[in-house]
Image (cartoon, coloured by chain):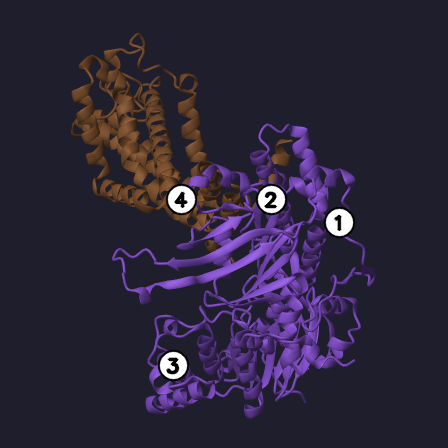
């Protein structure tokens, strides 16, 4: 049964391209490992770093197992509060992935909706939407996120802030990523809307909303899929940057960026592992997603098919 | 020894899953001063052979064995020799003049570059020669026009430039791959005449690849008929066309719509040679009852009244000058009566498709009104009534590859209008409806669970017809429904449309540039030119006794297969 499905996937063009691309296989396995580890963090991680009973300040600054003074119970050492690095990283990547996925989905919904309506309806509405994306694109995403975070801090009371921080972050990253989706969706919609199957639906008398989302949307999913993969990597990096700058998730639930920030303070006093391992994990995560996106872009583009 | 000799040519395309044989044991020869036609349906390997001669087969295709000799020199798979021969010895004319010239170079530069690559001439001489060439292919004011860019030429003129380019280095062989398919009848006539003259004047060997039997009949001396990569018949054109031997060839000749008479329906040959004569429609009483087939009333169904349509572009500065505006339609009026089939004929840009778009409300007219029965279709007050009439007008499109949503299964494509027009219909009756429709258009019920890309062009067009019929329309607009199809498939689809009209009492608006097809399909015909109506008349009167000079010209210029038939 399982073999049959594999064979079936292998038989399709995209599956064939996947299994014949080393980069695709390696990067997807790395991503899958990180994803599964963080998803089952409670099972995989040896400690729960946020459970204060397990944490002892006595263990702080334990170097990795292979260095001098390493402790066999802390594989990658501990941080300044005595939390196991390996466990914190797994829990941290969970936060990074949640924020990455959620913000890209938010950006996708907003961008695709605006893009498809702009492309299909046209006229003044299209001009307004597209100029809006142009304006949005001139604001660097970090700046945009800082702006949103600042506004959120002013509105939301301090006690609520830590709870709300993750949603603010998702909103901030999502709002800075949607123009990409809007542009790509609009361009593809313009191509699709002139095809005769759309005219046929119009002649049948289908309402525009149905033509847009039932007929056109499934036909433009490919480019959207590609940019959302590449956008995911970008969102993860943006999240880490914000957390590194201290405007991201609160220190009580550290993401990879927050971990790097903690470690940064101790980098010059010799405790390199606190910042080094989260950084490596972040690079591996972002790179694997990015490479996967690159492969997908090429594989889904019939013009780039290898001869 | 023949000028061009092709022997045992085998070409195959190796893909991941299978090997596709594009040409199998092809043998033919070509003499100087002779025009050879290669004809066949799409996918029969016509173009592959032409590309093999100039060694331009796209990978993964390759010549597996065989020989191609020009004047006894082996050129098969020999890139070094062919590189020199291309352009100098062999000229190539492509199908689409819009894309075969580089838009960024002046005509002058393109010609001179080619000439200087192959001939030992200096710039001045090459320029003179280019002007000479342009004059030869019939471009007026050549000294001035040579400074122009390709976009400043019309389609026919551009194809002339391409021909000038092809003969610029005095080649001995010209290969023309569908040279006139993208052109209008009148321009097609000029281009073919030009090719014929050049063949005689320069003693060229010419190979014309086409699917149009009319072109074959009018221009070629000998013809090769191909199917599935094999030559099924070759010989003198007049002999093959009047007395075809093989079944493939017979069916090809039979399906060509005759230009000189109206026939009841096209005869079709099954692959084993038997004639398919029975009606493809098997309407059960159930269907007819279900459809509530109307009696033919011969009353006025559609009134197209004084329509003018101006496309004023999307420019920001609104031009107020009357001359700047392009009138796609200029005061066009006609009526369509219930039960008839009405033809619209014209060359590209004559406004045929605009009329279809206005009737289906895809485009609003600038002036004038369209009445369906007594309801004005473009009156904003009539929105509710208009929606009621939406299902009564349906359309079949030209391109069967883009007119079906590739992400939908066939059954969903057909079910959509049913669900939309008969709100609250239960599942089983939708299924019955779909089954009826797929039966009507002559396809198997198994095809309902498949996706459009699994079907050929003709089958897709049938699905398209089924979808259009799903709303039980009274007026069916067919916008060039067969121009993307092979002749034998065209004959099938046209037969189907005829049968449907008879059985369901449909009114058909048939739009085409192909005069023979229109003659077979329509009761009355309107001729359009540049957005103006030239004349409307009954089909036979129009063909036998055209009153407008433009109609006369069109009729004179259409390629006629009958011209060379031996009785």
Instruction: Please give the residue where the numbered disc 1 appears in the rendered image.
Output: B281
Q: Crowdedness of circle 1 by 10 Å Cα count: few (<14), some, many (20+)?
A: some
- Give the mark, 4 or 2, whose residue is nearer the N terminus: 2
Instruction: Please give the residue where the numbered disc 4 appears in the rendered image.
Output: A120
In front: label 3 or label 4: 4
Quarter of the figure with the N terminus of chain A: top right
Return the chain for callout 3: B
- Which chain: brown? A
In front: label 1 or label 4: 1
Quarter occupied by residue B490: bottom right
The tint of chain B in the picture is purple
* CA distance for labels 3 and 1: 59 Å
- Residue B38 drawn at (x, y percent): 65, 74
Quarter occupied by residue A126: top left
Return the chain for callout 1: B
- The circle on residue A1 is none
- Residue A282 drawn at (x, y percent): 32, 33
């Amino acid at each position: 049964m399982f073999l049959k499905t594999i064979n079936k996937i292998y038989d399709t063009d995209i599956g064939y391209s996947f299994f014949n691309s080393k980069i695709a296989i390696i990067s997807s396995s790395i991503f899958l490992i990180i994803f599964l580890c963080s998803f089952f963090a409670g099972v995989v991680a040896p400690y729960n770093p946020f459970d204060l009973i397990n944490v002892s300040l006595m263990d702080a600054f334990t170097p990795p197992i292979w260095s001098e003074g390493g402790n066999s119970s802390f594989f990658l050492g501990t941080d300044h509060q005595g939390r196991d690095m390996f466990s914190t990283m797994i829990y941290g990547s969970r936060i990074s992935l949640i924020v990455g996925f959620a913000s890209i989905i938010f950006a996708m919904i907003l961008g695709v909706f605006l893009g498809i309506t702009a492309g299909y309806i046209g006229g003044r509405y299209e001009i307004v939407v597209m100029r809006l994306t142009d304006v949005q694109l001139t604001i660097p995403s970090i700046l945009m996120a800082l702006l949103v975070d600042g506004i959120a801090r002013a509105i939301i009371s301090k006690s609520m802030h830590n709870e709300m921080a993750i949603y603010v972050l998702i909103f901030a990253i999502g709002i800075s990523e949607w123009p990409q989706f809007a542009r790509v969706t609009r361009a593809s919609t313009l191509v699709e809307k002139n095809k005769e199957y759309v005219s046929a639906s119009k002649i049948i008398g289908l309402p525009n909303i149905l033509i847009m989302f039932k007929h056109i949307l499934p036909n433009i999913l490919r480019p959207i899929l590609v940019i959302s993969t590449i956008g995911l990597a970008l969102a993860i990096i943006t999240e880490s940057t914000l957390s590194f700058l201290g405007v991201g998730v609160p220190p009580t639930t550290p993401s990879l960026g927050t971990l790097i920030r903690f470690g940064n303070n101790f980098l010059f006093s010799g405790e390199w592992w606190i910042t080094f391992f989260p950084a490596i994990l972040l690079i591996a995560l972002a790179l694997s997603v990015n490479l996967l996106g690159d492969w997908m872009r090429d594989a889904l583009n019939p013009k780039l098919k290898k001869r | 020894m023949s000028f061009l000799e092709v022997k045992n040519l085998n070409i195959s395309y190796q893909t991941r899953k299978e090997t596709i044989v594009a040409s199998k044991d092809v043998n033919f020869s070509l003499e100087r001063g002779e025009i050879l036609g290669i004809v066949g349906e799409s996918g029969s390997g016509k173009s592959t052979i032409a590309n093999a001669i100039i060694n331009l087969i796209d990978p993964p295709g390759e010549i597996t064995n065989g020989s191609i000799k020009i004047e006894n020199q082996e050129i098969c798979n020999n890139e070094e020799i062919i590189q020199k021969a291309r352009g100098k010895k062999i000229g190539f004319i492509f199908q689409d003049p819009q894309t075969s010239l580089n838009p960024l170079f002046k005509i002058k530069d393109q010609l001179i570059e080619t000439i200087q690559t192959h001939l030992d001439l200096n710039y001045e001489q090459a320029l003179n020669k280019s002007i000479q060439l342009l004059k030869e292919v019939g471009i007026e004011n050549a000294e001035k026009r040579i400074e122009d860019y390709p976009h400043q030429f019309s389609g026919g003129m551009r194809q002339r430039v391409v021909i000038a380019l092809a003969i610029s280095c005095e080649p001995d062989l010209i290969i023309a791959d569908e040279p006139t398919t993208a052109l209008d009848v009148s321009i097609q006539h000029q281009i073919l005449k030009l090719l014929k003259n050049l063949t005689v004047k320069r003693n060229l060997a010419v190979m014309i690849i086409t699917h149009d039997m009319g072109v074959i009949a009018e221009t070629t001396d000998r013809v090769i008929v191909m199917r599935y990569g094999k030559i099924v018949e070759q010989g003198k054109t007049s002999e093959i066309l009047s007395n075809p031997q093989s079944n493939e060839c017979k069916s090809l000749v039979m399906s060509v719509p005759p230009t000189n008479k109206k026939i009841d329906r096209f005869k079709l040959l099954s692959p084993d040679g038997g004639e398919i004569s029975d009606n493809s429609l098997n309407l059960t009483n159930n269907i007819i009852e279900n459809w509530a087939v109307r009696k033919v009333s011969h009353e006025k169904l559609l009134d197209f009244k004084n329509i003018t349509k101006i496309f004023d572009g999307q420019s920001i500065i609104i031009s107020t000058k009357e001359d700047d505006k392009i009138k796609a339609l200029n005061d066009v009026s006609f009526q369509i009566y219930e039960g008839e089939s009405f033809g619209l004929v014209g060359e590209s840009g004559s406004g045929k498709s605009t009329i279809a778009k206005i009737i289906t409300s895809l485009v609003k007219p600038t002036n004038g009104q369209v009445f369906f029965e007594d309801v004005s279709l473009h009156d904003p007050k009539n929105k509710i009534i208009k929606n009621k009439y939406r299902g009564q007008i349906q359309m079949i499109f030209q391109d069967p590859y883009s007119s079906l949503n590739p992400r939908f299964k066939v059954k969903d494509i057909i079910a959509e209008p049913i669900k939309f027009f008969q709100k609250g219909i239960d599942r089983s009756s939708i299924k019955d409806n779909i089954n009826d429709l797929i039966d009507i258009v002559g396809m198997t019920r198994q095809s309902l669970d498949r996706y459009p890309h699994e079907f050929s062009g003709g089958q897709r067009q049938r699905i398209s017809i089924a979808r259009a019929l799903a709303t039980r329309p009274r007026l069916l607009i067919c916008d060039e429904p067969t121009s993307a199809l092979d002749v034998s498939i065209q004959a099938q689809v046209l037969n189907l449309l005829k049968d449907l009209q008879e059985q369901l009492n449909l009114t058909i608006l048939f739009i085409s540039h192909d005069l023979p097809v229109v003659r077979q399909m329509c009761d009355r015909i309107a001729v359009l030119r540049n957005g103006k109506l030239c004349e409307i008349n009954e089909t036979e009167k129009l063909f036998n006794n055209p009153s407008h000079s433009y109609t006369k010209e069109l009729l004179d210029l259409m390629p006629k297969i009958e011209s060379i038939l031996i009785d």
